[in-house]
Image (cartoon, rainbow, N blue to C red):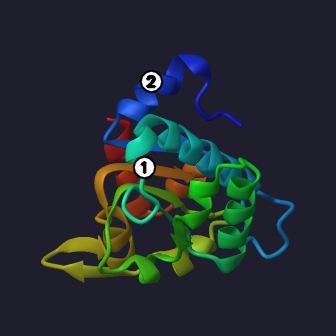
Amino acid sequence: SPLLKDDEDGRIMMQRVAFLPSSPDISAASGKINRSEAVIVARLAKKIFIQYGSAFNAKRTLGIITPYRNQIALIKREITRLSIAELNHILVDTVERFQGSERDVIIYSFCINHAWQLEFLSNTIEEDGMLIDRKLNVALTRARKQLFMTGVPELFRINLVYAALLNTVER
């Protein structure tokens, strides 16, 4: 996985918003899991746990958002494999379940393996001549301090809203 090579550790962990590219999981028949993202998310969770040390609080520090139940289960399995008990108590759920709550750090696993999934994921409306994705807005505003996102950049570029998000983060 491309995540967090030693020389990048500090740089990525210091960013307010960061995007970590994943690869499409073409072996997933339903398209509703992405193994590379699950590994990226678990490694990031470990880094955050270490960074926060004794200040880490499963209910306040970290939350993980992903659109599919299968991906939730896969991420939880990857986190369990880390053998860090506190991480087993963080909320890993859909954006709808996070509505109204915040965490210091949010990790968003988009879990998009195919272009058609962008339609399911986006909830775009036009308001005052601007495209607004309500679901994405909720996800991005759950983070008090840091937001980490992982997804397949080539697929993001197909959708206007997600392409704009990627361009903003890469600046």
Residue farthest to the top, as pictured: 7
| Element type where label 1 sits in the image | loop
Q: Residue at x 63, y 76 (%)?
A: 68
Q: Residues within 10 Å of mark 1 (few under 14, many from 20)?
A: some
> Where does the N terminus fall, quadrant-wise?
top right
Front residue of this view, candidates 19 and 80 = 80
At label 1, the amino acid type is Phe
Q: Position of residue 110 (x, y in %)?
A: 55, 63
- Label 1 sits on residue: 56
Q: Position of residue 50 (x, y in %)?
A: 51, 37
| Element type where label 2 sits in the image | helix
Front residue of this view, candidates 133 and 56 = 56
At label 2, the amino acid type is Gly
Dot 1 or dot 2: first in sequence order is 2
Q: Is residue 23 depicted above or below 51 in this figure? A: below
Dividing the picture into quarters, in which one does residue 165 lie? Answer: bottom left
Q: Is residue 13 depicted above or below 86 in this figure? A: above
Dividing the picture into quarters, in which one does residue 169 lie? Answer: top left
Q: CA distance from mark 1 to mark 2?
A: 18 Å
Q: Residue at x 53, y 38 (%)?
A: 47
> Where does the C terminus fall, quadrant-wise?
top left
Q: Position of residue 55 (x, y in %)?
A: 37, 46
- Label 2 sits on residue: 10
Q: Residue at x 20, y 71 (%)?
A: 130
Q: Please give left or right for residue 53 compared with residue 113 in the image.
A: left
